[in-house]
Amino acid sequence: MTAPELRVFGIRHHGPGTSRALLAALAGFEPDCVLVEGPPDADDLIHWLAHPALVMPVALLVYRPDELKRAVYYPFARFSPEYQALRFALERGVAAGFMDLPQRHTLALDYTAAMPPPGVFQDVAAAAGHDGYEAWWDAVVEQGKGHAGLFPAVLELTAGMRQATEETAAGETPEARLARQREAAMRARIRRAARAGHTRIAAVCGAWHSPALVDAHRTPGEADDVLLAELPSVAVAATWIPWTYGRLARSGGYGAGIHSPGWYDHLWASGEAGLSPAEMSAGWLAAAAALLREEGMDTSPGHVIETVRLAEALAAMRGRPFPGLPEMEDAALSAMCGGDGEPMALIRRRLIVGERMGMVPPDVPAVPLQRDLSAEQARLKLRPEPEASALKLDLRKEMHLERSRLLNRLTLLDIPWGTTVKARGLQTGTYTEVWQLQWTPGLSLRVIEAAAWGNTVRDAAAACATDAAAGRAELPELTEMIDQIIMADLPEVLPAILARIEELSTMKRDVPHMLAALPPLADVVRYGSLRQTADHLPLLRRVFDRLLTRACLGLPGAATAIDEGAAADLTERLSAAATAVRLFQAEEATGRWQQALGRLADRDGIHPNVAGRATRLLLDEAALRPDGALARLERALTPGGSVEVARYAADWLDGFLRDSGLLLLHDRALWGAIDGWLTALDPERFQAILPLLRRTFAAYPEGVRQQLQDRLREAGGRGATAAVQMPTFDPRRAAGVLPALGRILGLPAAAEVTT
């Protein structure tokens, strides 16, 4: 019988250059069995990698059905050597399998295998003139052309590293013993392949393990059998789930050290296209420029040319044959982003890490998240039905409260089984929610996609929300998330969201966004006890107070030299923020807010619409006496002057009166002041401001406009001079503007007012 030939290929997990070298080596070796480092518990799932509906990246999930939180993920990207080796075998009909200590043993333990000491890797990198091992490996291997001769060199290098480590190792720990058991299991798997009759065996494993496997087929297995004896065992299950490059960048195990999956994807695609290093660099920087242009940033072809030149110069200065990711990052930050960290952060998120998400066929085995969701649906008596139905919840009942939490958690996971028809929770302090439920076939796929976030609905929703918070760039989005988090009963996510709010509030000076962030926070502070958020109230109050302080300081600048659209937006946000401050119920915060409104009302240069709204808010909050408000009104409604002066007055009046016609009805002094100002306008100025006035009065409810019409009739019938006590008031002149006032109010009947 011919002795089997074994070739061990030590790879770096998820290395595109390693993948190219591995494919070249496998093609030259022509194995009849390919073994890849991974869980033998999932051998039956390898064939799914050839399914046409499977889209990379995906992850192999192995878990304990009796304890879903005990699980391990093995992510695969299209540039992963493990994936390429298995696809090589599947496409050629060659036997393929995993080799490692089965997870049925590993998941029974409460500790993990020891990792190689990082110091030995750093020594190698330092000897080669690099700051870190990852940077050295990237430059030497991953950006290379992928020669098959790589693997003998890797084997020699790691053998020396292991020898140096073993000479300095202390006594054996359980973690170190588990690491030896893993390699013993790999050798045992190779021997089984040889006994099965395979004569050309390819073993693909992490480079660190390769020296321990090279003689596996020629050495007896008694010592390994002793090492593997009496291991504990539990039942496990396995399946494929979608993965993302963002998750790959944060993974341990298979994904350890992979900080730039998007960049690796570009390296792989460039290698497949046969591009040179220069073409690869230029292509990536062109993609970065296109991304910035999509986001509305001025990035021209000239920026790309200068960035390419700078990256090449940096590579030459650092002794590199061509630019790598560090050189292109530095060049892009300087030449393309002008030193601004915000667009560079966008490039890192979208291109260096990447946003690619995989997909698995719908008929793969059920994932743990689906199992947990099914259990929750049964426990809460919520059957997934294809027909739409309404669900009314009384949150004072525990069962109803838990149903609400489940539906809100699924919403956070983008699994919209239910949509809120009537939600009167935190905002009004009542306990009623009404949901529209409908389970569609597409939601099953959403569950599979969401499985990447965790094995239970609660854990997955918390992880997804935490990740979403980290990606939010606007304050209102984050504060609105808080309400969702409270409704889903995920208080553990609040610190991350609040920390992100504080981070953004110090980085950004966008006062309207700060104001928009206040109402959701105030709702939670005021009504949060209904959802058991007492533990986080001090932190919530602190964040609200800091946001309010920064907004108050920036308000005068934000209300100066702005156009009508920005002013209208700011006045609306002022009104909402005023309500939030009242809900917050803090005397110091209220005082600070009213001082800021006072500066808006009195300072020169403030847009009149904003100044008018600030005056009205001060009046509503009793921080300004009625006679003080009247004095400001009369000062704003300066008689005479140009058309621009009249428009200024109309804008001020719009800010003061918008959405509050009852004030005009009940305060005769204000009525008289406005009446006198209108009467004094000549036709040219009146025609110029008529659209502004109509916008103000047309927004009033029908009932309020009817009462204003009645007041006009009263003024025309009996005269208003005595009521207003204005000796200069002329009833005949007032009667002349009544038809125009009727048109302003949008009431055709007003044209029939008699004098």
Image (cartoon, rainbow, N blue to C red):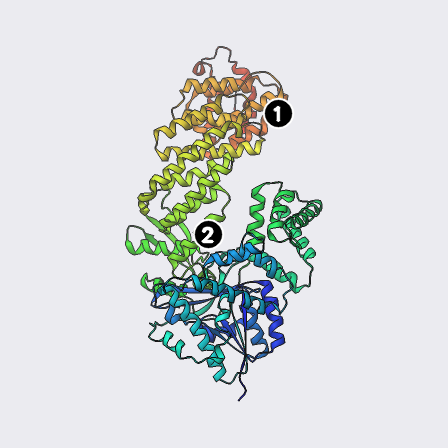
Instruction: Reply above or below: 734 against 364.
Output: above
Q: Residue at x 48, y 31 (%)?
A: 705
Which residue is tagged 1?
687
User: How many tags in the picture?
Assistant: 2
Q: Nearer the viewer, residue 671 or 540?
A: 540
Q: Amino acid at mark 2?
A: Asp
Q: Residue furthest left?
A: 397
Does residue 359 appear anywhere in the picture? no
Whether residue 310 appears in this view of the structure is yes
Residue 621 drawn above or below residue 627: below
Residue with the most extreme front position:
167
Q: Which residue is mark 2?
A: 467
Q: Relative to 38, is 649 above or below? A: above
Dot 1: element: helix
Left or right: residue 347 versus residue 391 is right
Left or right, residue 371 beside residue 701: left
Q: Residues within 10 Å of mark 1 (few under 14, many from 20)?
A: few
Rendering coords of residue 89 (x, y %): 56, 76
Q: Residues within 10 Å of mark 2 (few under 14, many from 20)?
A: some
Secondary element at image label 2: helix
Q: 373 or 572, which is in the foreground?
A: 373
Q: CA distance from mark 2 to mark 1?
A: 55 Å
Which residue is drawn at the image coordinates 65% and 61% (left, top)?
270
Q: Relative to the observer, which residue lies in front, 48 or 692?
A: 48
Closest to the camera, between mark 2 and mark 1, is 2
